[in-house]
Amino acid sequence: TPMAEFVDQIPQQPGLAFEEKTHQYILNGMQVLPSVTTLMKPLSDTLYAGIRPETLQAAAERGTEVHSAIEDYVTLGITDISEARRGYFEAFLRWMKDYNVQPLSVEHRAYHPALGYAGTLDMLCTLSKSDTDPQVLTLVDFKTSATVNKMLTGVQLEAYEQTLAATGLQVEQKAIVHLQADGRYQMPVYRKNDAESWRVFMACLTIHNHKQKYK
């Protein structure tokens, strides 16, 4: 089946582990790899400057709960979400139905073998606008924030796309699925191989590596 063919293409990188406590990616039990989120701090710090820490904390907890619920639903077929966050989960279900989504992998850990950074991709899936349209291999990141920030999301998705490309998997498109509290969603789609976003990410990586050298 075409589905199995997609699943077979997803790179397996068994040496990569994620340390919850320290929030670090460890390769083969020894090498610490910087995460995409860490590398992007020069961008995100600009965006979140002046926002109260408790506001950011609440947003992070909401995101974590919704992401966990999505993972439980896809991998175990169970629905486990608090009443306060139900709208976000219903938005996710509506998106699944509207786009005939076939999840291939959730919370997929990946690293770039040449550049030495890592990240967790929310979902790799195929989706289509209708039953008769072809299924499109799509890299998806879920957001539960009030708005979607283009400055960050394009760079983040590009960094993830390039980890897959480096191991031989070319996605056909990238998308942010913006889940909202009222059960609605939006799905902005991003260009493949976005040169500008990649330049920005590489600049972040270069700065990080330079700082590490002088630690």
Image (cartoon, helix red, strand yellow):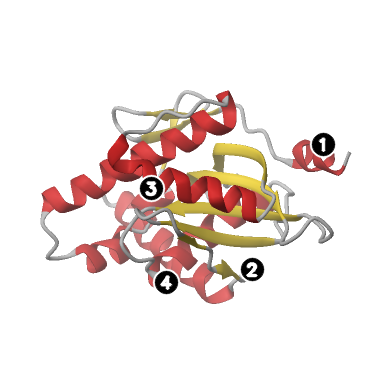
- Residue at coordinates 57% horizontally, 45% vertically from top-left? 123
Task: Place residue 48 in its image quadrant.
Answer: bottom left
User: Element at badge 1?
Assistant: helix
Identify the residue at image location x=16%, y=52%. 55
Residue 166 visible in this rendered orientation of the protein: no
Question: Quick one: label 1 or label 4, which is nearer the N terminus?
Answer: 1
Residue name at image x 55 percent, y 43 percent: 111
What is the total number of numbered labels drawn onto the structure image? 4
In this rendering, the label closer to the viewer, 3 or 4: 3
- Label at residue 4: 1
Numbered circle sitting on residue 150: 4
Position in image of residue 91 (x %, y %): 47, 51
Towards the viewer: 165 or 82: 82
**Looking at numbered disc 1 in the image, what kind of residue is underneath it?**
Ala
Q: Position of residue 50 (x, y in %)?
A: 12, 65
Q: Which quadrant, please, contains the N terminus?
A: top right
**Mark-to-mark CA distance, 2 and 4:** 16 Å
Camera-near label (2 vs 3) is 3
Q: Which mark is residue 87?
A: 3
CA gap between label 2 and label 1 equals 25 Å
